[in-house]
Image (cartoon, grey):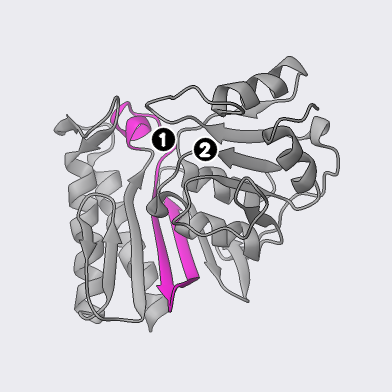
Amino acid sequence: MIKSTLLKATEAGARELQRFFNGEFKVSNKEGMNNLVTEADHAAEKAIIDVIKEDYPSHFILSEEAGEIKMDSEYKWIIDPIDGTVNFANGIPICCVSIGLEHNGKVVMGAVYNPLMNEFYFAQKGFGASLNDKKISVSNKTELVKCCMVTGFPYSYLDMPNGPLEVFEKFIRKGVPVRRLGSAAIDLCWVAAGRFDAFFEHSLNAWDSAAGFLMVKEAGGKVTDMEGNPYSPYQKKIVASNGKVHDELLAVINGGSI
């Protein structure tokens, strides 16, 4: 039942994303530079929450635009109605609905759906990860220098030792391909599917990563913070990989050379 609700809620949000995509809609800016929110974000969020509340009115909800809808429940829904809003607002089809489901503080299910590319990712703890109902797994590369990776940068960049630009520069100066797509949820799913070998980012929110990090783990990969500790969606920094290049990637992020 709860899986069915997750799938229904994700599809409901995706219908709103499709309805507004490449159309006319209102765009405003939240705190910080290029931190956009659109009419479509709000419509998708409402559609998602309506589905969840209909089936589980007593569940806790954490959503990017609405914030916390607090309830005394062992379940929490972590929602990004449109991950990749800047892409969406500019007609770039790299955006998605992302929903993670926590039970007693552990993410147990996740769904990420990009209807513009017809890609629906789903993961359940202990049961693997899938793309359009077909099982997926991480890549098998073992050398970091041969990897294809993806990252993201904070909108308000603060210079820091081993910060996003410094780490990015290390790789590109060695000719290692590092992409920036603009949607952390899709980045993580593409690591899970073996398209990318690793992903790292210095500043995410829970709704950006709750579904995607479970996808990577259930596809056989590894996800930690930047010190190599177990990852929680409530941490800002994340490193996700196929597991085979994880330690080498952590070493570079923490000041080492390639």
Residue stretch rendered in magenta on the structure: 85-114
Indicate left or right for 168 with 32 as reference: right
Residue 34 lies in the magenta stretch: no
Q: In x, y percent, where is residue 159?
A: 49, 22
Q: Residue at x 85, y 38 (%)?
A: 143
* Residue in the foreground of this view, choosing between 39 and 144: 144
Quarter residue 105 falls in: bottom left
- SS type, badge 1: loop
Say if residue 204 shows up in the picture: yes
Q: Quick one: which residue is furthest to the top in this view?
A: 173
Q: Which residue is mark 2?
A: 202
Q: In x, y percent, where is residue 58?
A: 22, 81
Q: Nearer the viewer, mark 1 or mark 2?
A: 2
Q: Which residue is mark 1?
A: 93
Residue 99 lies in the magenta stretch: yes
Q: In x, y percent, where is residue 138?
A: 71, 53
Say if residue 196 shows up in the picture: no
Quarter residue 57 falls in: bottom left
* Residue in the foreground of this view, choosing between 176 and 5: 176
Q: Quick one: which residue is furthest to the front in this view?
A: 161
Q: Residue at x 56, y 62 (%)?
A: 214
Q: Residue at x 20, y 37 (%)?
A: 38
Indicate left or right for 91 with 157 as reference: left
Kind of residue at disc 2: His
- SS type, badge 2: loop
Q: In which quadrant is the C terminus drawn?
A: top right
Going from N to C along the chain, the mark reached first, 1 or 2, is 1
Q: In x, y percent, where is residue 139?
A: 76, 49
